[in-house]
Amino acid sequence: MKKHFMKGCEAIAEAALRAGCTFFAGYPITPQNEIPEYMSKKMPEYGGVFVQGESEVASVNMVFGAAAAGARAMTSSSGPGISLKSEGISYIAGSKLPAVIVSVMRGGPGLGSIMPAQQDYLQATKASGHGGFRMIVFAPSTIQEAVDYTQKAFDYADRDRNPVMILVDGCLGAMMEPVILPEYHDNCNKKEDWVLDGCLGREPRTVLSVSLTGEPQEQFNIEMAKLYESWAEKDTEVEFYEMDDAEIVLAAYGTSARIAKTAIDMLREEGIKAGLVRPITLYPFPLNAFENLDYKRVRHVLDVEMSIPAQMVDDVRLGVLGRAQVSTFGRSGGVIIGVEEIVLEVRKIAEGGGFQ
Amino acid sequence: MNKIYGRPESIRNRVSTYCPGCLHGVANKIVAEVLDELELREKTICVLPVGCGTLGLFYWNVDMISSAHGRAPAVATGIKRCVPDKFVFCYQGDGDLAAIGLSEIMHAANRGENISIIFVNNSIYGMTGGQMAPTTLEDQYSTTSQKGRNPITEGYPMKMCEIISGLEAPRYVARFSMDSPKNIIKAKAGIKKAFELQIEKKGFSFVELMSNCPTNWGLTPIESLEWMRENTLKVFPLGVYKEVE
Amino acid sequence: MDRVKIISENCKGCGYCVVVCPKKVLEIGEAANKMGYRYAVAARPEECIACKLCALMCPDSAIEIFK
């Protein structure tokens, strides 16, 4: 199969186009500018619509409209821009519309730094907007995964009528790897019975997220809660690396996971039995993967993130339930974790001391 | 005897939830009449705001989407660009369009999106109980300008037709009033002009409709019409601000 | 049949139709509808010239005109 050597951001954009994305609106923000730039050039070639919105706010609202009109619609941004999109994402979720949101993480909070980080885990998984909605969040760790999960994101968004997020960091966004691109999906514009296309031959439809009384809003929340619960069973994805006999378990996602794998290889050579649990869906979080570890063997879980304070560790602790020590190691602000740093930290743990 | 006037098809046969005397009812009606006359109802998608206009969700008889506060022009952009053969209009109030949504309206206008904007301006925030709007008059009482709007700290009423007509792309920008049958007839003609422009794919149109708020102005409906003539209409001149053939 | 018909259940008693009518056909009546509004009535329907000004002005599309 033909491989293309592509930059992460561009590969995500190309994967979206091939998944039948026909509408993209976005605003420049480092480190995801290649996504709108690529879309501005390629989307018209694919017959779709590209708009550089006047802001992240406007862009997500354009996606909201396009989704209501039946298009496979996507927007992308980084931390500060995702903050701006919060309201729009909530409206998309509250109106039961499908959309894909790509977040390419940088340092934060505030203006932060433009270099890669994993500082937006909580934003992505716990509170991307008001109203208590949830999104499936994919955290690819390679550009091939970014391509594959972009495809999946559109499918799941349509399946659930809900926004789906792809969460990567600026590293993955900027680096280049060979990827196999999927075939082009034709004609993905939807004609479902909720699409707004004019009431010819039918009763008018309304896309809304508002309720004038309490009970309908509650009913909506109840239905959505059932949807979110259904994900845990069928949509959770996780990778286990060197876990058969691991005594010290690393928990990491995205770029941190790749660095952790290299560290684990080095540690194994020293006889230290380290392994990795790599969540691929950050929501639904693979709690089972941590709940079901053999705690007669596993004595320590080290959460490795490019985030200070660590964010995913809260979910890791929920899975570990106190049956092993949990500690964190990370860098932030755009400082990439070094392989040696992880090796040193695990050695300290193996020697029975020293964790943050 | 034949019926020569009645409820338009593009409005449902039910009571609206606007206050007694609220000219939103008239705005809805004349827009609906134009939709009927131009045979647009079955290909229309109406983008509703946050404000009293949201209550149109239970009144209009067309496909509708309830958008976030101020974002209607962006939502309309997304819809129209994807389904350009449909008829897309935004229906917004003065807080929605001129306060929180100022960026979205300016940029949709500047891009010359082929959509139509109905801007209902009553110089107050109705739904939330009477706070100051960008279009509130100097010295006008509101719950957040209780000594009257002071231009030094609150600026002057914002005149959107004047601002938008200064952009290159818009094709029709006009302000009408709904305080009298004569003005309502003119307003309807302006709305028709704007909608025809969209049908002809000629670009962006903007119709401002001066309106009232008996409830938050603290007046009876009939008094509120008089207040419009004595106050609002003296600050917001009616007329066509831009018309490109 | 009268030229002007008020759909009383939709009327909110705002009074616009009463003041715009050139022939003083309409008044706010004594009776209230289900919503509690005293609705407009055609007090002098025979004077109606079907000019439609009342129907144009009505914010509730509660007036039908026949000719």
Image (cartoon, rainbow, N blue to C red):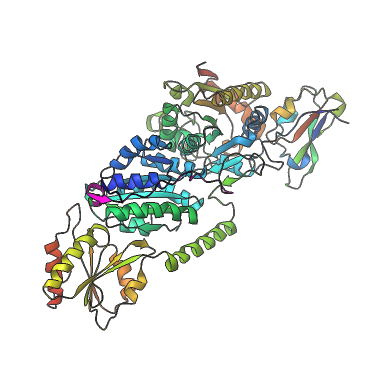
- Residue C62 is situated, as x and y percent measured from the top left of the image, at 74, 36
Q: Where, by quadrant of the figure, is residue A54 drawn?
A: top left
Q: Where, by quadrant of the figure, is residue B7 drawn?
A: top right
Magenta segment main secondary structure: loop
- Closer to the camera in the image, A241 or A333: A241
- Residue B120 is situated, as x and y percent measured from the top left of the image, at 55, 32
Apparent side of residue A14 relative to residue A194 in the rendered image (left or right)? left
Q: Is residue A78 visible?
A: yes
Apparent side of residue C9 relative to residue A310 in the rendered image (left or right)? right
Up the image or down, A193 lies above or below A140; here it is above
- Residue A78 is situated, as x and y percent measured from the top left of the image, at 30, 47
- Closer to the camera in the image, A177 or B188: A177
Asked if residue A190 lies in the magenta stretch, the reply is: yes
Please state the extent of the stretch shown in magenta in the rendering.
A172-194
Q: Residue furthest top?
A: B245
Q: Residue furthest front?
A: A1
- Residue C60 is situated, as x and y percent measured from the top left of the image, at 69, 36
Asked if residue B230 lies in the magenta stretch, the reply is: no
Q: Is residue A354 visible?
A: no
